[in-house]
Amino acid sequence: MRALVFLLIVLAGGCAPAAAVAGPIPSEAQRHQRELVRQVHQVWGLDGPVALHAAQVHQESAWRAGVDSPVGAQGMAQFMPGTSAWMAELYPELGEAAPYSPRWALAAMTRYNRRIYNGLRPMQADSLPRCDRLAMMLSGYNGGPGWVSRDRRLAAAHGADPDRWWGEVEHHTNRAGWARRENRHYPRRIIEELEPRYLRAGWPGRPSCP
């Protein structure tokens, strides 16, 4: 059941390059920049990926706090109601689930991302490259970390490198066609297109995939 909840969180070798794509940053982003920086620094440390998280919020909701998706995902971080309730249980310091509160949503997103990131372990190598690990994290946020584990095992079974997302794991999944397309597009757009916009605008962080 939880995998289905994760699956409904809404919205192709080596490291994927960060494409220099121009585009606007929503005006609402500036309003919430300080809070996002605070949350990322608190959860990830002072060198945490602020620009990446900003790009993720951009992809999820375009920084709109009151938005609902067609399938029922809510707020800036686009959590399903069941996921919001679970996050409130998992992180009681956040208080009662409040997906339409920007502060709550940003705090929950940064913690959930960190939880997924920390749960990723190398299967063959000594470590996971940061670029690939962040892409797997984003895939897990979008479709559920359980699916990332299954995709990695499937990739290994087909002779691909389960510790590399780009050009390896991203090409292996048993997801339905629509879910595969959305999930594979998700980390690419965030890392290649949106994150560079925020980095150029001076948001803290370093490129996920230099």
Image (cartoon, grey):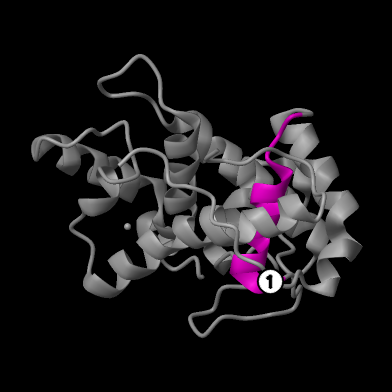
Image coordinates of residue 2 in percent, x first then y, are 40, 55
Which residue lies at the image location 30% right of the left edge and 40% below the top edge? 149
Which residue lies at the image location 20% right of the left edge and 51% below the top edge? 172
- The answer to whether residue 96 is seen in the rendering is no
Q: Taking 86 as reference, is 96 left or right?
A: right
Residue type highlighted by circle 1: Gly
Q: Taking 152 as reference, is 46 left or right?
A: right
Image coordinates of residue 138 in percent, x first then y, are 49, 50
The segment highlighted magenta reads 47-62
- The answer to whether residue 202 is seen in the rendering is yes
The extreme top residue here reads: 126
Q: Vertically, is 59 above or below 204?
A: below
Which residue lies at the image location 74% right of the left edge and 63% below the top edge? 98
| Within-10-Å neighbours for mark 1: few <14, some 14–19, many 20+ | few
Q: Taking 115 as reference, is 29 left or right?
A: right
Image coordinates of residue 150 in percent, x first then y, are 24, 44
